[in-house]
Amino acid sequence: MDPFIHWVRSSAASNWVNSTVWIWPLCETLHFIGLSLVIGIVGFFDLRLMGFFRRVSIGAARELMPLALAGFLLNLSTGLVFLIGLPEQYMHNSAWWTKVGFLVLAGLNALFYETTLARRLTAMAEGADTPAAAKLIGALSLFSWFGVLYWGRMLPFIGNAF
Amino acid sequence: MFAWLEGTALATWTRESPSIWAYPTILTLHTIGLGIVVGANAVVDFRLLGFGKRIPLSSLLPLFRITWWAFALNAATGVLLFMSDATTKSAQVVFYIKLSLIAVALVTMIATRRMVDSREPTLPSRARTVAVLSLLLWAGAITAGRLMAYL
């Protein structure tokens, strides 16, 4: 066991997660609710970026984004509970690192959108088609979030932990 | 009957095949479908609650088609997951709670679809109640589903 995992494992927080029976199922349930929010809200925005739901302006679709952020923060915090509880099952698991990779991809893609196209597209009127770059960003976002979901759910089956 | 179901070739394959395409993929498809069904419903429900007010309600109508396809995926994968462990799952109270919550959630979904499809300029006063109920029912169905692995 490497020192970092050993350090996490011997912490009071890790001990609390592992000795409290309801914490794991509770966090799993919240993790599933959070993932639904992210898939639903971000997915809707992505489809609009790709040119669907044109009667909705990008600016209007964007107004739902705080809900997606709430879902993401819920999953970040419940995910941290899992990681603190059983760090060795994640950090030694290639499926988990693949999931983290998809998360980074989704994050960088969103950051790229925010720093390049966001301002112009948010001001765009409803009914307008989106430029090809926006369609690509939307598709990549959809792909990366489903990737996060896929590798998260496949974690017990593909990786080498558990 | 549940023992027979569990013994069928399809149930045995789902449960025992070492293939990644058996149990792991079926379970993952069930989770992907869950995300789409609950997520798309949440978009409609939060819009009814006043989030994203600039989104024209009727523009959300095509979302329901996506939701129904995802629901069909989950009904199919759900049947397979149930078959693979029928004797245990059929004896779980929480399984029937999950099915009941989904049944009532579908009723609220039909109600929200009607509101989205309506030509009335104003929402009926029950819109918020239905939206909150829908969010709680889907969250409840997720909770019951998750608890099936623990109880």
Image (cartoon, rainbow, N blue to C red):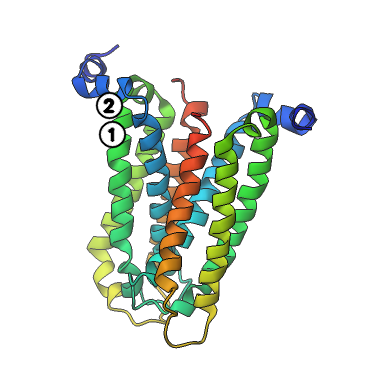
Q: Residues within 10 Å of mark 2 (few under 14, many from 20)?
A: many
Q: Which residue is mark 1?
A: A80
Pinpoint residue B88: horizontal percent, then vertical percent. 64, 28
**The residue marked by circle 1 belongs to what chain?**
A
Q: Secondary structure at mark 2?
A: helix
- Vertical side of B127 occupied by A153: above or below: above
For the question of whether residue B8 can be seen, the reply is yes
Location of the N terminus of chain B (image quadrant): top right
Extreme residue toward the top, this view? A1
Name the residue located 52 percent from the left edge and 82 percent from the top edge: B118
Left-right relation of B137 to A109: right
Q: Give residue A64's quadrant in the image.
A: bottom left
Could you tell me the amino acid type at mark 1?
Answer: Leu
Which residue lies under the disc numbered 2? A84
Q: Quadrant of residue A81?
A: top left
Chain letter for the residue marked with disc 2 in the picture: A
Relative to A7, say whether A35 is above or below. below
Give me the disc on residue A106: none
Q: Looking at the image, do the residues carrying marks 2 and 1 touch, with CB atoms under 8 Å apart?
A: yes
Question: Residue A54, located in which quarter of the rendered image?
Answer: bottom left
Q: Check if mark 2 and mark 1 are on a common chain.
A: yes
